[in-house]
């Protein structure tokens, strides 16, 4: 039954930013509920303002709503004031298109792009009035499915989710809906058995996990023949056409702009980068398709800004031509173009200049580490001289502010590497001062490196809390002075992210305890509740340090080893060894290192891939 | 010569919950989707030229709001209205669209007052509400605190009356001054009437403008 507007209105007039909870966005799709047999609610467990900027959800929304007999609506995590108001009034969490309670949908599809959303996943299930545990739900409840980058290690939330879609969702989501249609009248067990046979789908209850006495995983075994082992990630061989009827919010959101993915995957092979490892191979979208899509997006949204998304903009083979064409074509509309992830090289400065229309706000660089040695360790080898040279060029062309991104706590980092961060930042400031004097500004963002599953650093320990604090303190001291500004991550939050990233299935109970004790919006400084998490770990008798600060050995079965991204473990180990030998390897477009992608997916190869046709 | 279009419109539904700035942006995007030849401001960050007569608070509905929108080249008002009607989101409805003198005084400077109706769900008897309305109107001054500042609400209340009554509900009408630095707020009036804790909905009926300056 639809939530009556009169009941909702009473809540909306007393919460902050009520526009988050009312829908009505341009391009929202409202299909006939009664005449549509399969109803999916796409759920984003973060606040509306962030969720609306997520491209993945929009892509699936578009694909599902194009399907005959299927409707897709949306829900986001209510801010705590709204969550309290919903509970107090007994109104269940509802969809923004037709105001149906989430419990009335057939499928809830959660996006889990990052780990600190796990308690919000529970919060949304609870606000929907659903049992949290997959084992406690049956065919009378919606199927709870999740996907997104965090789910390459699904184990910490395996207790709550019925099935995970691992990898690219565009084709998998269609198969999931078809499998559901075939089994919808069956028991939950039968529904899940159907889903388990869809390539790329992982149904956790069909796998048993055994542990060694020391807490490491002994084995993960399927408990029925339909469950594949390992579960191989889904990929789309060619990027499907991008959505152009993009949702346009009525209220302001984080990134209020049209979005187009110009390329998926990255060939650079930075060893810390999760996205770079789990989205291989590189697949470029043809230039003509991008231009046509941008035209459609602008016409259908009215946006004055478009973001060209990829993991490394300058690596798109026709990026110069693309940017030039867009700038020319939409000069009359004063279109802003945003290009994230520019590399530190003069070509990137040219690109940034081409899209700046005379505006020179801030120019962002990500050297990641302070010394050339450490940049070789992480396989992002950029000479210090080049950083300074490019900075000089940026300032010379009119920018006054340069943002620098660094990480502390990288494997093999020494005090000298940390000191070099400050030195490099001051060096960049000196370049700026030569041109702009005291008006030159360098903003330094220092995050703490978190080892991620499926990367060469998956075996590495997280830096100790003492080291993190000491290094932050050292930088705080050395980065004082005019024209320098530093920002940090809260170390306790980093510890939590690190625990959840490489957690095993036992962490589900901890996530649940933390949620019960009030943990929500764990990625938000204002809400992060260290006490709730510490209590959760203590109650479950688990030590966070086991997950964060422990170095793993080559033979250890990692909790996510049964999820195969296509990149082979021996390749990751080789990269890990090379990093310890301070050896970098050039971009794999020029030379294939046999990461495993071609072995796993080679029969899907197309010329738009960054890979050569064969493993060499 | 730039063309200036004046649009009179209502605000309902989801658009009630947007802020003034957000709603202004909704107009810009609708105009872009409609393919209108918008006139842009100068500078590094050019924006479509649009001017809204008076900010409408979050949560309020409105019957007759006004804004001006500038075109880089002339368009037919009928065509412009039809094109916008196609692209406006649910909750914004155009009532009139006319071309006006580009040199006419700016809208915000002409707003003098606004008329509201407030529907209040209350257990206070209508008889008692009437008595409080009389008392308020009879008061010399009504000192109130808002955001730590004391001000006098009384001179901002140009009119206040009971418009209708239904069981458990009373509908109040009011005309409040709406000038720069002297804006009466309906919720402040309700609070002064002892109804501030009750559930209420506010609708802005119309804006009262100064007559256009002569010469």
Image: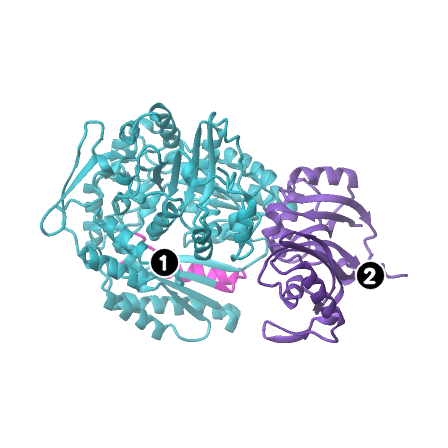
Circle 2 SS class: loop
Question: Residue A377 colored magenta?
Answer: yes
* Residue ID at (34%, 48%): A122
Mark 2 vs mark 1, CA separation in Å: 60 Å
Which residue is disc 1 drawn over?
A367
Work out which quarter of the rendered image holds the C terminus of chain A and state it. top left
* Residue ID at (48%, 34%): A62
Q: Position of residue B209 (x, y in %)?
A: 80, 59
Q: Is residue A23 left or right of residue B12?
A: left
Which residue is disc 2 drawn over?
B210
Q: Quadrant of residue B107?
A: bottom right
Please tell me how crowded label 2 is: few (under 14), some (14-19), or many (20+) other residues with Cα within 10 Å.
Answer: few
**Helix, strand or loop for the magenta stretch, by majority:** helix
Question: Residue A581 colored magenta?
Answer: no
Q: Position of residue B16 (x, y in %)?
A: 62, 51
Please tell me how crowded label 1 is: few (under 14), some (14-19), or many (20+) other residues with Cα within 10 Å.
Answer: many
The outermost residue toward the top is A182
Q: Colour of chain A?
A: cyan
Badge 2: chain ID: B
Q: Colour of chain B?
A: purple
Out of A135 and A206, give the one closest to the viewer: A135
Above or below for A460 versus A437: above
Magenta-colored span: A373-401
Res. A127 mark:
none
Circle 1 SS class: strand
Q: Is residue A349 left or right of residue A196?
A: right
Out of A315 and A164, give the one closest to the viewer: A164
Q: Position of residue A69 (x, y in %)?
A: 46, 26
Above or below for B195 versus A261: below
């Amino acid at each position: 039954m639809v939530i009556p507007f009169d009941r909702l209105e009473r809540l909306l007039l007393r919460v902050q930013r009520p526009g988050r909870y009312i829908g009505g966005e341009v391009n929202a799709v409202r299909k006939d509920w009664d005449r549509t047999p399969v109803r999916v609610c796409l759920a984003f467990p973060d606040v509306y303002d962030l969720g609306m900027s997520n491209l993945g959800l929009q892509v699936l929304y578009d694909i599902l709503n194009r399907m005959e007999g299927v409707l897709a609506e949306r829900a986001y995590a209510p801010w705590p004031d709204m969550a309290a108001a919903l509970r107090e009034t007994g109104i269940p969490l509802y969809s923004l298109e037709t105001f149906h309670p989430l419990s009335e949908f057939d499928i809830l599809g959660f996006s889990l792009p990052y780990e600190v959303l796990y308690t919000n996943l529970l919060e949304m299930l609870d606000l929907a009035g659903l049992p949290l545990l997959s084992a406690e739900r049956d065919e009378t409840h919606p199927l709870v499915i999740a996907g997104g980058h965090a789910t390459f290690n699904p184990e910490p939330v395996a207790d709550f989710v019925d099935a995970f879609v691992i990898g690219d969702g565009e084709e998998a989501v269609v198969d999931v809906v078809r499998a559901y249609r075939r089994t919808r009248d069956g028991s939950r067990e039968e529904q899940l058995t159907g889903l388990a046979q869809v390539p790329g789908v992982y149904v956790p209850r069909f796998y048993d996990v055994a542990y060694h006495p020391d807490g490491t995983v002994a084995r993960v075994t399927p408990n029925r023949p339909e469950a594949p082992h390992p579960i191989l990630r889904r990929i789309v061989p060619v990027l499907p056409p991008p959505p152009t009827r993009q949702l346009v919010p009525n209220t302001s959101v984080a990134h209020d702009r049209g979005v187009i993915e110009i390329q998926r995957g990255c060939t650079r092979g930075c060893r810390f980068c999760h996205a770079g490892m789990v989205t291989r191979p590189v697949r470029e979208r043809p230039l003509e398709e991008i231009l046509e899509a941008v035209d459609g997006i602008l016409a259908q949204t009215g946006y004055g800004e478009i973001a060209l998304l990829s993991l490394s903009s300058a690596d798109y083979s026709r990026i110069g031509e693309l940017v030039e064409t867009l700038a020319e074509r939409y000069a009359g509309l004063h279109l802003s173009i945003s290009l994230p992830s520019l590399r530190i090289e003069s070509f990137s400065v040219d690109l940034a200049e081409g899209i700046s229309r005379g505006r020179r706000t801030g120019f962002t660089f990500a050297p990641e580490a302070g010394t050339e040695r450490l940049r070789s360790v992480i396989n992002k080898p950029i000479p210090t001289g080049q950083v300074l040279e490019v900075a000089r060029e940026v300032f010379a062309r009119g920018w006054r502010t340069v943002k620098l991104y660094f990480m502390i706590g990288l494997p093999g980092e020494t005090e000298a590497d940390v000191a070099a961060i400050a030195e490099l930042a001051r060096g960049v400031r000196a370049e700026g001062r030569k041109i702009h004097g005291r008006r030159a500004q360098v903003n330094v963002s220092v995050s703490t490196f978190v080892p991620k599953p499926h990367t060469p650093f998956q075996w590495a320990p997280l830096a100790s809390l003492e080291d993190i604090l000491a290094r932050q303190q050292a930088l705080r001291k050395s980065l004082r002075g005019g024209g320098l500004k530093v920002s940090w991550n809260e170390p306790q939050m980093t510890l939590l992210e690190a625990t959840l990233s490489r957690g095993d299935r036992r962490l589900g109970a901890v996530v649940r305890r933390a949620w019960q004790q009030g943990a929500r919006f764990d990625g938000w400084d204002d809400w992060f509740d260290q006490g709730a998490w510490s209590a959760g770990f203590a109650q479950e008798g688990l030590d966070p340090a086991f997950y964060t600060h422990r170095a793993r050995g080559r033979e250890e079965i990692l909790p996510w080893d049964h999820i195969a991204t296509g990149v082979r473990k021996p390749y990751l180990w080789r990269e890990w060894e090379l990093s310890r030998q301070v050896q970098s390897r050039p971009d794999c477009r020029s030379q294939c290192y046999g990461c495993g992608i071609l072995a796993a997916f080679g029969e899907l190869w197309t010329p738009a891939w960054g890979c050569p046709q064969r493993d060499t | 010569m730039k063309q200036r279009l004046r649009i009179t419109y209502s605000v309902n539904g989801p658009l009630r919950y947007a802020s003034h700035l957000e709603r202004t942006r909704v107009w810009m995007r609708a105009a872009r989707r409609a393919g209108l030849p918008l006139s842009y401001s100068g500078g590094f960050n050019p924006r479509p030229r649009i001017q809204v007569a008076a900010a409408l608070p979050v949560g309020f509905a409105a019957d007759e709001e006004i804004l001006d929108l500038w075109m880089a080249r002339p368009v037919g008002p009928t065509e412009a209205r039809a094109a916008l009607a196609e692209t406006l989101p649910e909750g914004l409805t155009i009532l009139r669209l006319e071309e006006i003198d580009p040199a006419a005084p700016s809208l915000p400077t002409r707003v003098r007052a606004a008329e509201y109706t407030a529907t209040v769900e209350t257990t206070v008897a209508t008889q008692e509400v009437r008595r409080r309305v009389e008392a308020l109107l009879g008061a010399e001054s009504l000192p109130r605190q808002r955001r730590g500042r004391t001000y006098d609400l009384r001179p901002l209340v140009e009119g206040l009356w009971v418009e209708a009554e239904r069981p458990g509900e009373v509908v109040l009408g009011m005309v409040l001054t709406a000038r720069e630095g002297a804006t009466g707020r309906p919720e402040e009036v309700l609070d002064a009437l002892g109804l501030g804790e009750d559930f209420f909905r506010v609708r802005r009926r119309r804006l009262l403008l100064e007559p256009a300056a002569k010469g």
